[in-house]
Amino acid sequence: MRKLYDKFKWPTDKEKKWARMTPEERLEFARLAAKLCAGNAGSIQYVSITAKKENVMPHIRRDPNKLYNYMIGMLLLDHMARADEVIFAPDDRSIKVQSGNSLHDYLQTQLWMERGVATELKTVPCDSSKNLCVQFADMISGIAQGHYEDRSSEPLRVLARHFRPFLIYNR
């Protein structure tokens, strides 16, 4: 991320968002992300989960954070269950859903009750404007979003060897 901020002279006091990046900046992000992954011999995985929201039942869409929490669980719980402790730094969507249950509580309950593991989940909320790791994750999400929603697939092609997208509610 620092290389991108330096190369493109992005102001460091303002978070760079995928939606405001040029095609050249997006491709450079994909190149650097692929290089990072290739240089770490399989210890890094890029994954995303995408839902075709119009195929999600209307009663589920009324509280979009419930769908978000469910999708995060689908994507991460198996990985989390392999660890004794997980430090999880989610974005602001982890705020409580209308039912009052937070993403942290949902994931911890799933780990303990459904997966039968003693994994201790530590959730550390963060401000993405000050966290380059969260900005990186948001840009990975931008690659998936660009491919599925905007039909802009070149960044995904650059990263494809290191990227596993999951689709739900695709039919």
Image (tube, helix red, strand yellow):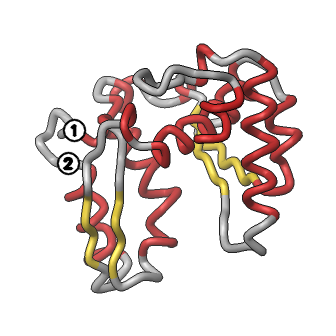
Examine the rendered structure and indicate whether residue 65 appears above or below residue 82: above
Residue 7 lies, in percent from the top left, at 71, 30
Measuring 40% from the left and 40% from the top, which residue is drawn there? 68
In this image, 157 relative to 47: left or right? right
Q: Left or right: 45 with respect to 51?
A: right
Residue type beneath disc 2? Ser
Quadrant of the image for the N terminus? top right
| Residue 3 percent location from the top left of the image | 66, 40
Residue 171 seen: no
Image point (65%, 43%), residue name: 167
Give the secondary structure at mark 2: loop
Q: Residues within 10 Å of mark 1 (few under 14, many from 20)?
A: some
Q: Which mark is residue 71?
A: none
Q: Residue at x 35, y 60 (%)?
A: 88
Q: How many marks?
A: 2
Q: State if disc 2 and disc 1 touch (CB < 8 Å).
A: yes
Can the viewer see residue 97?
A: yes
Residue 102: assigned label = 2
Mark 2, Cα crowd under 10 Å, few <14 / some 14-19 / many 20+, is: some
- Residue matched to label 1: 95
Compared with residue 143, is residue 77 higher up or lower down, i.e. above or below? below
At which x and y percent is residue 2?
Answer: 59, 41
43 on left or right of 24: left
Label 1: which secondary element: loop
Q: Quadrant of residue 50?
A: top right
